[in-house]
Amino acid sequence: MSDRVFTIPNLVSFVRLLAVPYFWWVLLAEERFGLAAGLIFVIGGTDWVDGYLARKLDQVSALGKLLDPIADRLMIASALIGGLIAGAVLGVVGWPLLVREAIVGGAAVLLMIRGHQALDVRMEGKVATFLLYGSIASFYFVAADILVWLFGPPAWIAGAVGLFLYWWVAVVYLKETRIRLGSLESEATDQEV
């Protein structure tokens, strides 16, 4: 892993971050649920691109390991909050996801404050994120009355499976966080002795 900042994968992650304010504009200022859904699909669909390019081009970087999950969390939180505000995402799906984001985000901040590296992204988390991007975007298409018969069932199926996986991975992350914080405390105790 390098300390390089200017890499192609980091550029992809940065563009994904820049797409988030545009999403908010499309959703709230223009009230175009269909376009907002398309943005969620595109941003979610490019989630794997930065990681793939980092490995393929041997450009894995500390900044990239930070930017990728931030871009994911920011877009999912935006799609959820925006969807709840606009009525595109139902509370039964949106609120449990937001609570999970707050808990895992808080744990990540705590690790950073205590001097630990971010937790590695798990494959199950990537699968959950992919499912949730599809589910949330599908709910937006349903709210826009676009092919409801096509997007409605996958929205619920992918949402249920994604929600379950997302919370399962959250439990794993919290256990790893507790272990790391415990090792930090035992190191501090050892140094005092």
Image: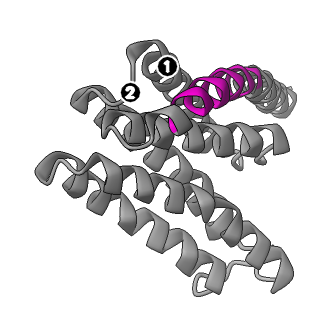
The answer to which image quadrant residue 105 occupies is top right
Q: Is residue 135 left or right of residue 95?
A: right
- Number of numbered discs on residues: 2
Quadrant of the drawing holding the N terminus: bottom right
Tell me the magenta residue range. Answer: 151-168
Instruction: Determine whether, in the image, residue 121 is placed left or right of residue 146.
Output: right
Viewer-proximal residue, 186 or 129? 129
Q: Is residue 192 above or below residue 69?
A: above
Q: Quadrant of residue 188?
A: top right
User: Residue 190: where, in percent of width, then height?
Assistant: 87, 29
Q: Which mark is residue 24?
A: none
State which quadrant residue 65 falls in.
bottom right
Residue identifier under label 2: 89
| Image-based side of 4 in relation to 124, left or right | left
Amino acid of disc 2: Val
Furthest toward the top, the residue is 92
Q: Would residue 166 be counted in the magenta stretch? A: yes
Magenta-drawn stretch contains 105: no
**Residue 93, labelled with which disc?**
1
Q: Are circles 2 and 1 on residues that touch, CB within 8 Å? A: yes
Q: Residues within 10 Å of mark 2 (few under 14, many from 20)?
A: many
Q: Is residue 113 visible?
A: no
> In the image, is 45 to the left or to the right of 147?
right
Amino acid type at image mark 1: Val
Residue at 62% across, 38% down: 114
Task: From the viewer's side, name the closer residue of 6 and 151.
Answer: 151
Nearer to me, 21 or 42: 42
Magenta residues, dominant SS class: helix
Which residue shows up at 76% across the image and 42% down it? 127
Q: Secondary structure at mark 2?
A: loop
